[in-house]
Amino acid sequence: MAAALRARAKGYEVTLIDRCPRLGGRAQVFERGGYRHDAGPTVITAPFLFQELFELFDKRMEDYIELVPLKPWYRFRFNDGEHFDYGGSMEDTLNEIRRLSPDDVNNYQKLLADSKRLYDVGFTALSDAPFHSPAFMFKQVPHLIRLGAWRTVWQMVCRRIKNDYLRQAFSIQPLLVGGNPFDTTSIYGLIHFLEQAHGVHFSMGGTGALVDGLARLMDEEGIRVELNTTVERIETRGNSITRIKVYDDNHNTREIACDGVISNADPAHLYGELLPAESVKKSAHFKVRHAKKSMGLFVLFFGTRRQYPDVAHHTIWMGPRYKTLLQDIFKKKILAEDFSIYLHRPTATDPSFAPEGCDSFYALVPVPNLEAELDWEKEGPQLSRRVIEALEETMMPGLTDCIEADFFMTPEDFEERYLSPQGAGFSISPYFSQSAWFRFHNRSEGPDNLYLTGAGTHPGAGLPGVLCSAKVVDHLLEPAR
């Protein structure tokens, strides 16, 4: 959607094609039994990236979308019952750190300074810079060495922070973009300063309302939208795309002529399934074969006939293991008995998500992707039961008696609904060897008039990442003639 708006602002006639029943891609909305659920991203940082889209057309985001700051940003709940509220004002955060580990107050400020140095280079200077030239990549190497990019996020945090609770809380951010903190380059440590600089927000009405605001802007600016429509094939002549073949929900097919394509499909699906093999460069074929996918996601959606006012809007429920659990998920590809949970309670901020006196939730559990070959028809109901039991025993008493309208998604649903290879939740993982120039390029490694946006291309997953990928394409597009 961001790329469509940026292309339209450059004078192009734009048609947006989405496989889903409503706009937003993975940011779908589910409604069951009077409860509403955002199915995709729920954490909004860097709101100025959305604001820019409206400013392209001399309009105000506030006339379309209502963003409110959250406090705290996240509540961490640890296995022994201890908790840590992160975010709000700087003083709020420092007071919480002081409560847990007084010696880490100064250490956190050093960590934040490290994060700012990464932010100044990794986000401000490079997040919307095209990384197609090896020479441009090599020019960044001295900066990356100086910033310690060879370290992992976990190593970066442990250099400064001594308390184990805080080490977990301040290293978990890569999981929000599909990475293992013990393997992800410390470049992603910039997220700390990003959050401090711009806060963590919620769109009243949910991410679906944010999508609706962008959809209204697109309609006003003459962008055509086709929903429930899937791209089956991209046709080329020479080095250019000439048309795409699509089908609807009834499998009726047709062809659409075009002068160019901006793809938000997973790059592995784009290059492996949609384009003629001979039109794809060897570099892209290599990445499709060898890229390491992110973990999968199990998401349990449910409502409760009572409210849980002590549960924060965003809760990170930490299980008994941290490093070894992530090894099970990312490396061993096994579904362990224990788990950690991101629990989303939008009714903490917006009561419209549930009937009066009720709460709406989703519980997201990182799990192995489909390379694990798990039987999700069997594992799904069992994991759902274990998640409910764990929440009831620790922070949501009486959950079993008041839960209703519950359902879940597994990595198989991500593969089927979003055509995500191996059911990965965030395309390819953000290893250093899969970042910047090493990631799928925004200017295609194939036809000349093909561009890539989204989680699998530079700069990566997460709302700031995908919005910045649209800015990269904007830099690459010449104004329409």
Image: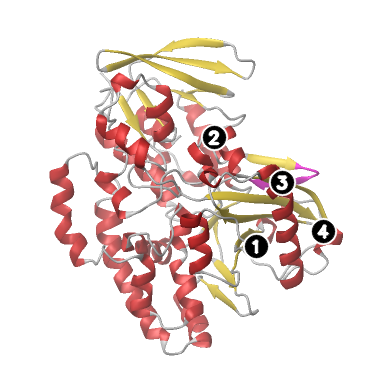
Q: Quick one: 260 or 58, which is closer to the camera? A: 260
Q: Quadrant of residue 458?
A: top left
**Label 4 CA crowd tier, 10 Å (few <14, some 14–19, many 20+):** few
Left or right: 417, with 136 as reference point: right
Q: Residue 194 lies in magenta, yes or no?
A: no
Numbered tag placed on residue 357 in the rendering: 4
**Disc on the earlier residue, 3 or 4:** 4
Q: Quadrant of residue 109?
A: bottom left
Q: Measuring 26% from the left and 61% from the top, which residue is drawn there? A: 120
The disc labelled 1 sits on which kind of residue?
A: Glu
**Label 3 CA crowd tier, 10 Å (few <14, some 14–19, many 20+):** few
**Label 1 CA crowd tier, 10 Å (few <14, some 14–19, many 20+):** few
Spatial distance from mark 2 to mark 1, Cα to Cα? 27 Å
Give the mark toward the camera: 3 or 4. 3
**Disc on the earlier residue, 1 or 4:** 1
**Disc on the earlier residue, 2 or 1:** 1
Give the mark toward the camera: 1 or 4. 1
Residues drawn in magenta: 32-38
Which residue position holds label 1?
A: 337
Q: Quick one: 69 or 330, which is closer to the camera? A: 330
Numbered tag placed on residue 418 in the rendering: 2
Q: Quick one: 423 or 68, which is closer to the camera? A: 423
The outermost residue toward the bottom is 102
345 relative to 476, above or below = below
